[in-house]
Amino acid sequence: MGVSVLSDILVASNLTKRYGAVTALNGLTCRFQRGKVYGLLGPNGSGKSTFLKICAALTMIYQGEVLIDGARPGLATKAKVAYLPDADYFLDWMRVGDVVDFFQDFFDDFDRTKAEHLLRELELEKHILASTLSKGMLARLKLAAVLSRRARLFLLDEAFDGVDPVTREKTIDIILDTFDHESTIVLATHHIDYVDKLLDEVKLLRRGEVIREVAADEVRQSTGKSIGEYYLEVFRHAKTN
Amino acid sequence: MRYNDREPIYMQIMQEIKTDIALGRLAPGMQLPTIKEQAAIMRVNPNTVARVYSLLEQEGVITKHKGLGTFVSTRQTLAAELKRELAGVTTSRFISEMSRLGLSAPEIEAHLRQFQARP
């Protein structure tokens, strides 16, 4: 088991998760430092979402260890972790305003002023039923709710899925505005080209394991490639092995 | 700002700021945006901007004044120095492209003259 360094907010050691015969995580080991933006990249089924769910304390049964600020995921860590799930999770009766109220009730670190600002910025009107929002507007609502928290660790699972170019740009601006040297942002995504200017570090996942860990600048400097090209090269090569 | 995929982002931003100074768009002594503002303007990670500022400070292009902010160096020769540096970078890039085509120094020179002679 790895020794936790003071600057690490999240440490995963030998993490294994099986769903029946399917191995979602296969001894995943990695660490995340404070004050950095990470890209968690990998094809479908590589374990990104499973890993984030475990970190968000939504999946409690697994082997190995995850430590967030030194504690296992649970009630105590939920207060530090803001998680944006891939799935939609608002209840049918909820209006945009209810979602914000719900988050405020639930999380002590919820910043109401920021939430109001983000709703305006993202053109979300409070009286609209969440269930009637388009895919893009729903993505905006999830983002506004989650990024209105003053959390230490933001885990964003496919924040860019089903999002139009304008929303994408706004999302990037909001992520940049939320980030500071005490927080850590983990972006799990297929949309590598959207995020590559935001990333400090890249972790590539394949079949439930971290197969590459590299600084984003390092990719360009040593290979002369974008992160997207680097990704394709690594996975093309991995397939032939 | 548009970024290319070949060079690290921090290097591209450094070049951009140096170009702005060389062309007088950023004057000596002018205040630069804070790291957070600059990151928002350029849509990049603030750590990248922090790296840019600290490298530019090491090179004497900008200076940080505690509590006041970050400023373009007041050295009057700065714009000329940076223009020379950037021209050097562009020239060496040009030379290496031409060398890749198998051209010798006199041939490259001939191309330059020919280009200049064009109406």
Image: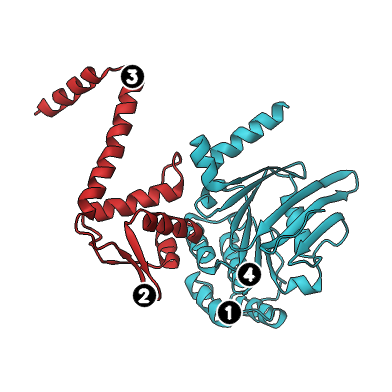
Chain colours: A cyan, B red
Judge by depth and name the residue closer to the eye, A192 or B113.
B113
The residue wearing badge 3 is B101
User: In the picture, residue A150 is in which quadrant?
Assistant: bottom right
The residue wearing badge 4 is A146
Q: Is residue A237 above or below residue B58?
A: above
The residue wearing badge 1 is A127
Q: Residue at x 18, y 26 (%)?
A: B112
- Dot 4 or dot 1, earlier in sequence: 1
Say which amino acid is labelled 2.
Leu
Tags 2 and 4 both on a single chain: no
How much space separates mark 1 and mark 3, taking CA atoms?
A: 65 Å
Say which amino acid is labelled 1.
His
Judge by depth and name the residue closer to the eye, B58 or A149.
B58
Q: Is residue B76 above or below residue A114?
A: above
Q: Callout 3: residue from which chain?
A: B
Q: Position of residue A88 (x, y in %)?
A: 69, 63
Describe the element under mark 3 as helix, strand or loop: loop
Q: Residues within 10 Å of mark 4 (few under 14, many from 20)?
A: many
Q: Callout 2: residue from which chain?
A: B
Q: Are marks 1 and 3 in contact (CB under 8 Å)?
A: no
Tags 4 and 1 both on a single chain: yes
Q: Are marks 3 and 4 in contact (CB under 8 Å)?
A: no
Q: Is residue B11 above or below residue B42?
A: above
The residue wearing badge 2 is B68
Describe the element under mark 2 as helix, strand or loop: loop
Judge by depth and name the residue closer to the eye, A174 or A39.
A39
Say which amino acid is labelled 3.
Leu
- Dot 3 or dot 2, earlier in sequence: 2
How much space separates mark 3 and mark 2, taking CA atoms?
A: 51 Å
Q: Position of residue B107 (x, y in %)?
A: 22, 17
